[in-house]
Image (tube, grey):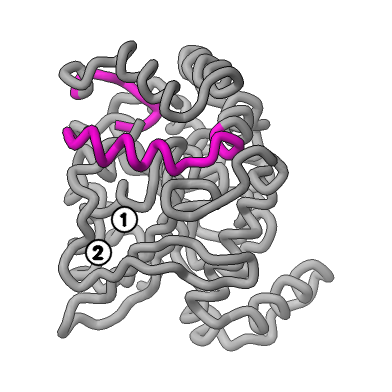
Amino acid sequence: MSRPATFVPPSGARAYRLGTARGEFAVIDAPVAPGTAAKGTVLLLPGYTGSKEDFIALHEPLAAAGYRTVAVDGRGQYETPGPKDDETPYALDELARDVIAQVDALTGATTNATTNASTNATGGTSTDSGADATQNRVHLVGHSLGGLVARAAVLLDHTRFRSLTLMSSGPAEISPSQQQRVKLLRDGLAVMNMAQVWDAIQALEPPEDAAGQKDLDAGLDDLETLRKRWLLNSPAQLTATGRQLCTEPDRVAELAAVPLPVHVLSGERDDTWSPALLDEMAVRLTAHRTVVRGAEHSPNTDCPLETAAALAAFWHQLDQ
């Protein structure tokens, strides 16, 4: 599971519940640094078993680069509640609709975006001016599972977004070795409660070995905080999204047809989706490609300064 360096938001950031048309979502919202020209808003979606805290180390460098960053717990993740037994709300399209509702709440762009989506669907042109439309769109970043959710949101309605970054998130299902890990977790959730599953995970993966593990995410030694986060996750969410990770179809061709800039970013080592596979996906998408040296599956926690610099550089070039 992901291990952020801290669960404490940086100075100036605000943790609160974002009200949307689809309910409330726990977020960490960091404004642009004082005295810095605002360049846009970024929505950050965490990976499987992760949370909004996985992006904590990105807030300050991106604020200094001119970006407001909003990291969110998805439905049933950590501090955003969700049904514990019903998997229906965790279908990928439902999670994608949550993302669109979050964007609307952050930008107040519901009317314009809905108009754009309707016009686009009929083959017409948008009625928004280019400057206004760009201002009302966000840069979307999805890590791992969050990348699959982000892709689904873009395919549902790309007009709400300025760009898409797929961070350590591949074209289809995860690798066979990681599928086996997810299956073990799903099997455990079927017969044990969350506390029992946590104890089983700790028995199989001792804390002192955490630095060398190659989990679905990667690094915080505060086991009590990690345990609290784990216990607040919805079992139904973990089961449903775990199944999605193991069965996701290849939707790269669909995404390539969307008129939206795409960035494929990863570490140089990853056994969830291999860097070579991500290289190939980037070519198919005609996407910008970044490999963060020294990082594995979670460049956001492994090498946050380098990751933030790569993100900002990609967004900056879009405005040139």
Query: Residue 85: percent from the left, percent from the top?
Result: 65, 38
Q: Earlier in the sequence, mark 1 or mark 2?
A: 2
Q: Is residue 225 rendered magenta in the image?
A: yes
**Tag 2's secondary structure?**
helix
Q: Nearer the viewer, mark 1 or mark 2?
A: 2
How far apart marks 1 and 2 lie (CA) works out to: 8 Å
Query: Residue 25: percent from the left, percent from the top?
Result: 49, 62
Question: Which residue sits at x=50%, y=20%?
Answer: 185
Q: Would you name the residue on which mark 1 appears?
A: 311
Q: Would you name the residue on which mark 2 appears?
A: 62
Answer with the quarter of the image where residue 303 lies: top left
Question: Which residue sits at x=28%, y=59%?
Answer: 313
Answer with the quarter of the image where residue 218 lies: top left
Q: Name the kind of residue labelled 2 in the image.
A: Leu
Asked whether, in this view, residue 150 is left or right of residue 92, the answer is left
Residue neighbourhood size for the residue with mark 1, other residues' Cα within 10 Å, grouped as few (<14), some (14–19), many (≥20) = many
Residue 318 visible somewhere in the drawing:
yes
Quarter of the figure that contains the C terminus: bottom left
Circle 1/circle 2 CB separation < 8 Å: yes
Residue neighbourhood size for the residue with mark 2, other residues' Cα within 10 Å, grouped as few (<14), some (14–19), many (≥20) = many
Q: Which mark is residue 254?
A: none
Q: Which residues are magenta?
A: 211-238
Question: Which residue sits at x=23%, y=33%?
Answer: 223
Question: Which residue sits at x=59%, y=66%?
Answer: 23
Q: Name the kind of residue labelled 1 in the image.
A: Leu
Residue 165 visible somewhere in the drawing:
no
Q: Compare residues 154 and 310 and report the one nearer the observer.
A: 154
Q: Is residue 209 rendered magenta in the image?
A: no
